[in-house]
């Protein structure tokens, strides 16, 4: 006689008999409770947001657009390939090697910058090759150069955004010009 036949009706079930049924019911109850809590929390959030909107709560109002870029958005940088140029002679032959990064308003400007990169590189190379080592060796000279590169980039990109380019004024750095390029940073600057 087998063990299954040895079990008498009405006797206690072997391991795993009724216990899985109780576990299944308990699991269904827990899942139903979690779903109800999530639904109640979502409804409460919707109710609270509508209440604040109806009251005209200024904390929930979208912030006003800042003068540059989108508020709270991470910065967008465009890396430029290295530039190497001969500088204007002062004390013999000297050259400049520069690696720069431009901070731009948003990803749209970044895409446009890549599209206009040949023209931008040409203009920056022409700008750099007109410089003397003495003009750009100090911190002030480098800042002025960064502003001039920014101005050149904004002139080039004005075509991408169909905005008329602002003309540079004599004796003024290009930093006064507005445009989609916010600033230029040098990551390497070598004069030899």
Image (spheres, grey):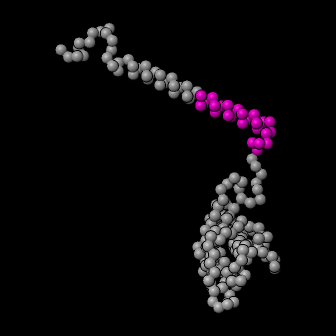
Q: Quadrant of residue 152?
A: bottom right
* Residue found at the far left of this picture: 1
Residue 48's spot in the image, x, y percent?
72, 33
Whether residue 28 is visible here, answered yes or no, is: yes
Asked which quadrant contains residue 130, the reply is bottom right
Q: Is residue 77 left or right of residue 7?
A: right
- Residue 40 counted in the magenta span: yes
Residue in view at x 51 percent, y 25 percent: 30
Q: State the image coordinates of residue 131 (x, y, percent, origin top left).
A: 70, 83
Quarter that holds the N terminus: top left
Q: Where 22 falls versus 42 (above or below)?
A: above
Residue beneath the point at 81% across and 79% down:
171
The single residue placed furthest to the top in the displayed view is 10
Seen in the image, is 170 located left or right of residue 42? right
Measured as percent of width and height from the top left, residue 179 is found at 74, 67
Q: Is residue 106 above or below residue 87?
A: above
Magenta-colored stretch includes residue 14: no
The magenta region covers 37-61
Task: Determine the residue positioned at 72% across, 54% down.
Answer: 71
Check the picture and name the quadrant holding the C terminus: bottom right
Which secondary structure dominates the residues rendered in magenta?
Answer: helix
- Regarding residue 151, the answer to whether it shows in the image is no
Q: Is residue 6 above or below residue 57?
A: above
Q: Nearer the viewer, residue 101 or 96?
A: 96
* Residue 14 locus on image (x, y percent): 31, 17
The residue sitting at 79% across, 42% down in the picture is 58
* Number of marks in the rendered image: 0
């Amino acid at each position: 006689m087998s063990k299954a036949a040895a079990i008498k009706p009405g006797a206690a079930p072997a391991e795993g008999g009724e216990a899985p049924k109780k576990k299944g019911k308990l699991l269904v109850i827990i899942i139903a409770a979690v779903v109800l809590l999530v639904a109640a929390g979502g409804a409460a959030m919707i109710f609270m947001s509508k209440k604040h909107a109806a009251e005209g709560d200024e904390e929930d109002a979208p912030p006003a657009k800042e003068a540059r870029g989108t508020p709270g958005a991470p910065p967008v940088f465009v890396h430029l390939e290295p530039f190497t140029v001969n500088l204007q002679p002062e004390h013999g032959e000297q050259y400049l090697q520069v690696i720069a990064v431009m901070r731009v308003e948003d990803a749209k400007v970044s895409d446009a910058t890549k599209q206009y990169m040949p023209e931008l590189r040409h203009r920056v190379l022409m700008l750099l090759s007109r410089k003397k080592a003495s003009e750009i060796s100090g911190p002030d000279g480098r800042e002025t150069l960064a502003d001039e590169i920014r101005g050149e980039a904004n002139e080039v990109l004005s075509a991408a955004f169909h905005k008329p380019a602002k003309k540079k004024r004599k004796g003024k750095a290009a930093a006064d010009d507005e445009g989609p390029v916010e600033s230029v940073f040098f990551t390497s600057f070598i004069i030899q």
